Amino acid sequence: MVLLLVSVTVLHLVTLAMLFTAILEKSWWVLADTEITDLWYNCYHDNSTGNWLCAANSENDWLQSVQALMVLTVVFSSVSFLVFLGQLFTMSTGGLFYFTGLCQICAGLTDFAACLIFTFHRKEVLDEARESSTSHFGYCFILAWLSMPLLVVSGVLYVHLRKKQ
């Protein structure tokens, strides 16, 4: 039982770290390794100085919805972890972690919605058609997609996890 508890806790912390990385790093869309776009900034590589020059993304409805859903995902997952710790020490023996699991599943669903919006409305989110043969999704976008099934699986594990002594 202790091994299962530690495994679920580590899975939760790993997915939370993946979500923070996906939101805070600058690699949702990469254009020819000279331009990187994320949820907050659009950065260009200046060859003369070797630095990245970043400007805020122009606001549009699709971008704001992706931003809000990803922030909501982190909030749901963080609340889920805090509630889990609280329930772990205060819940009576035999209780189930329903609320923790529900929050984690909601985090997975909001992450899924944000990734779908970015996937299908990429041109609107990026505010212009910057498609080329060298442009591709960045690693933060892939991390966001990978964290979605992990969030749902850990949510289901929390729902079935029973507190024992």
Image (cartoon, rainbow, N blue to C red):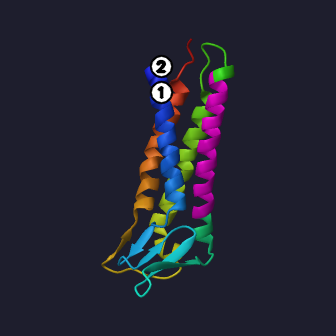
| Res. 21 in view | yes
Answer whether residue 115 is magenta in the image.
Answer: no
Front one among 39 and 25: 25
Instruction: Name the residue: 50% across, 82% down.
Output: 128
Q: Residues within 10 Å of mark 1 (few under 14, many from 20)?
A: few
Quarter of the rendering containing residue 70: bottom right
Instruction: Name the residue: 52% across, 35% down.
Output: 155
Residue type at the position of mark 1: Val
Asked which secondary structure carries label 2, the reply is: helix
Residue 21's spot in the image, x, y percent?
50, 55
Front one among 114 and 52: 52
Asked which secondary structure carries label 1, the reply is: helix
Q: Residue furthest left?
A: 133
Q: Is residue 155 above or below residue 124?
A: above
Answer whether residue 74 is magenta in the image.
Answer: yes
Residue type at the position of mark 2: Val
Q: Is residue 12 above or below residue 30?
A: above
| Res. 151 in view | no
Residue 147's spot in the image, x, y percent?
46, 48
Residue 65's spot in the image, x, y percent?
61, 64
Q: Tell me which segment is drawn in magenta.
A: 66-88
Quarter of the rendering containing residue 142: bottom left
Residue 2's disc number: 2
Q: Which residue is mark 1?
A: 6
Q: Is residue 135 above or below residue 75?
A: below
Instruction: Name the residue: 51% across, 68% down.
Output: 38
Residue 46's spot in the image, x, y percent?
44, 84
Quadrant of image for the C terminus: top right
* Mark 2 in CB contact with mark 1 (< 8 angstroms): yes
Q: Is residue 83 above or below residue 106?
A: above
Quarter of the rendering containing residue 3: top left
